[in-house]
Image (cartoon, rainbow, N blue to C red):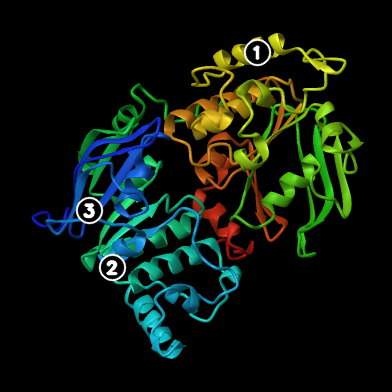
């Protein structure tokens, strides 16, 4: 894409810094955004990307420096001020009310009308007009909870456009989208840019930086360490600038013959969600030693229930979960762990760590009452500390010490703590969900290498991920999960992300048609 409107700067930061009590999150940031430009912002976890965007959007006040809109200095005391000045932001985790309609969500806080009466018909017409203008096709009367993730994202964009946004910040906009939805989003972004809207995209996907943006800034430890025109830069150069070293972007996985009896086997498993509806509807599959089976699917199609039923947090209504031939469906989580079932959960902060506890304590969670860490009723604290120091070194956990709270670590290092604990337990089966969600390329490279090491040790691995590229890179087999059912199985080398994405959204094709 060629740069448009380069002569007109719509947004500029001059020497912007943001100091927190112990962290300088942004350090002397100078950045410009042109009218009709698509600008990418890259950086490792903790590099300061989100802090900078929150400063621009009025969630934080800069410690020093200034923000200019159209060449004029501005100060925002809240996002409301930023919105009034034409800035909009679509957060990675959408800010929508599930039980309201599309129109009600879009006008929330900006409702038209007089004397406490909302002019719903007028606002609905305006929502329809904006959606038609930018081809953001959405049913204005549909309830949010009934919409797919991709459609909900359109609602967030419409919400910003309804408020007359001319500068749009998108935080990890493709994190939970199928390939088809990514293509549709890029088409929408292209139409917005043609209308003169300027866009900043925070993303960790280097191929998307190349595909959609005009320029890219690279942040490292709060500073801008590089600025490039995307048509003149390679993914490898961007990755090296981000991480400060050469990064291997391609996963090299040796071909191997998968054999032996299944380690884990699900037979017609039915699990109900909290509403009493079947979230898993009679699914059956197995994973053999040294095999990685990837579960592909749009978020909300049973992934959480699959993870929690296998590790013992959700009741299996019917069917069996066999581990080495033994039905473990009624065993506790502790009993399953004792049988060498390990789990890296989708939400590392909720289910993988106790954030106020130290790294040492987190590294023995689930094993704290067992030898060698426990002597009758007492913990062997010196041994636990030595154990933690060994794992910190082995798994390259970046920390000043093992006695600091896990909550003080970056997302990538928190994930390494969980990996260190689970992989060092010597599992026969590893259930790993969203292993690299929200992580930078350096952390992703490391975590992928650890997963493949476990494969080489003949561990059976079930990988649940919303990242199709990750599923394709690591999996020996791909199973597509849609509405609680396995609807298709693929060998990754014999399919494409588009075909898998087609089945992820409920598509079907017949033998006779042979086309999607």
In this view, the residue in front, 145 or 375, is 375
What residue is rendered at 58% in x and 29% in y?
Answer: 406
In the rendered view, does 368 fall on the left or right side of 27? right
Residue identified by numbered label 2? 84
Give the mark nearest the N terminus, 3 or 2: 3
Residue 244 position in % (x across, y down)? 33, 23
Q: Is residue 55 left or right of residue 428?
A: left
Q: Say whether residue 294 is left or right of residue 159.
A: right
The residue lying at 58 percent from left, 65 percent from top is 513
In the depicted view, which residue is nearer to us: 477 or 138? 138
Disc 2/disc 1 C-alpha distance (Å): 53 Å
Q: Kindly report the distance in space between the C-alpha atoms of the residues bearing marks 3 and 1.
A: 54 Å
31, above or below 138, in the image: above
Tell me the SS state at disc 3. loop
Q: Is residue 328 above or below residue 169?
A: above
Contact between marks 3 and 1 (CB within 8 A): the answer is no
- Write the residue at 78% across / 40% down: 311
In the rendered image, residue 454, in percent from the top left (x then y), is placed at 65, 23
Res. 1 mark: 3
- Give residue 291's quadrant in the image: top right
Residue 422 in percent (x, y) is at 69, 26
The residue identified by callout 1 is 385
Q: Is residue 506 above or below residue 490?
A: below
Tag 2 and tag 1, C-beta contact below 8 Å:
no
Instruction: Judge by depth and name the residue closer to the eye, 421 or 432.
Output: 421
Could you tell me which secondary element the residue under label 2 belongs to? Answer: helix
The C terminus appears in which quarter of the rendering?
A: bottom right
Disc 2 or 1, which lies upstream in sequence? 2
In the rendered image, the residue lying farthest to the left is 7
The answer to whether any part of residue 225 appears in the image is yes
């Amino acid at each position: 894409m060629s740069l448009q409107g380069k002569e007109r700067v719509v947004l500029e930061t001059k020497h912007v810094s943001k100091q927190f009590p112990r962290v300088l999150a942004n350090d002397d940031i100078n950045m410009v955004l042109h009218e009709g430009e698509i600008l990418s912002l890259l950086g490792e976890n903790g590099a300061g990307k989100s802090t900078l965007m929150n400063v621009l959007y009025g969630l934080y006040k800069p410690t020093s420096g200034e923000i200019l809109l159209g060449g004029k200095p501005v100060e925002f005391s809240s996002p409301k001020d930023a919105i009034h000045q034409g800035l909009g932001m679509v957060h990675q985790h959408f800010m929508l009310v599930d039980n309201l309609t599309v129109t009600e969500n879009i006008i929330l806080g900006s409702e038209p009308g007089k004397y406490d009466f909302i002019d719903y018909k007028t606002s609905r017409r305006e929502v329809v007009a904006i959606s038609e203008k930018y081809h953001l096709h959405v049913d204005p009367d549909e309830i949010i909870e009934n919409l797919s993730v991709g459609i909900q994202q359109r609602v967030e964009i419409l919400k910003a456009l309804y408020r007359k946004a001319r500068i749009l910040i998108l935080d990890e906009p493709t994190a939970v989208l199928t390939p088809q939805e990514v293509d549709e989003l890029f088409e929408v972004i292209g139409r917005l840019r043609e209308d003169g809207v300027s866009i900043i995209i925070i993303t960790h996907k280097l191929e998307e930086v190349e595909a959609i943006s005009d320029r890219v800034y690279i942040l490292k430890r709060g500073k801008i360490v590089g600025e490039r025109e995307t048509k003149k830069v390679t993914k490898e150069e961007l990755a090296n600038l981000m991480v400060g070293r050469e990064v291997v972007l391609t996963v090299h996985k040796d071909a191997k013959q998968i054999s032996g009896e299944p380690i884990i086997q699900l037979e017609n498993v039915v699990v109900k969600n909290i509403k009493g509806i079947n979230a898993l509807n009679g699914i059956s599959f197995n994973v053999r030693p040294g095999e990685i089976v990837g579960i592909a699917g749009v978020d909300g199609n049973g992934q959480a229930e699959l993870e929690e039923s296998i590790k013992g947090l959700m009741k299996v209504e019917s069917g069996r979960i066999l581990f080495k031939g033994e039905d473990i469906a009624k065993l506790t989580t502790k009993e399953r762990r004792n049988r060498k079932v390990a789990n890296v959960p989708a939400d590392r902060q909720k289910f993988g760590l106790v954030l106020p506890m130290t790294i040492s304590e987190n590294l023995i969670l689930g094993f704290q009452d067992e030898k060698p860490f426990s002597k009758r009723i007492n913990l062997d604290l010196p041994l636990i500390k030595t154990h933690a120091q060994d794992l910190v070194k082995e798994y390259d956990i970046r920390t000043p010490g093992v006695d600091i709270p896990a909550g003080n670590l970056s997302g990538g290092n928190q994930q390494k703590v969980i990996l260190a604990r689970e992989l060092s337990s010597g599992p026969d089966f590893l259930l790993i969900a969203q292993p690299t969600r929200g992580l930078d390329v350096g952390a992703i490279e490391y975590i992928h290498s650890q997963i493949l090491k476990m494969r080489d040790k003949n561990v059976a691995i079930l990988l649940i991920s919303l990242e199709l590229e990750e599923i394709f890179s690591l999996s020996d087999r791909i199973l597509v999960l849609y509405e609680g059912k396995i609807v298709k199985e693929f060998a990754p080398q014999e399919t494409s992300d588009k075909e898998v994405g087609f089945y992820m959204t409920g598509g079907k094709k017949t033998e006779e048609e042979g086309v999607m």
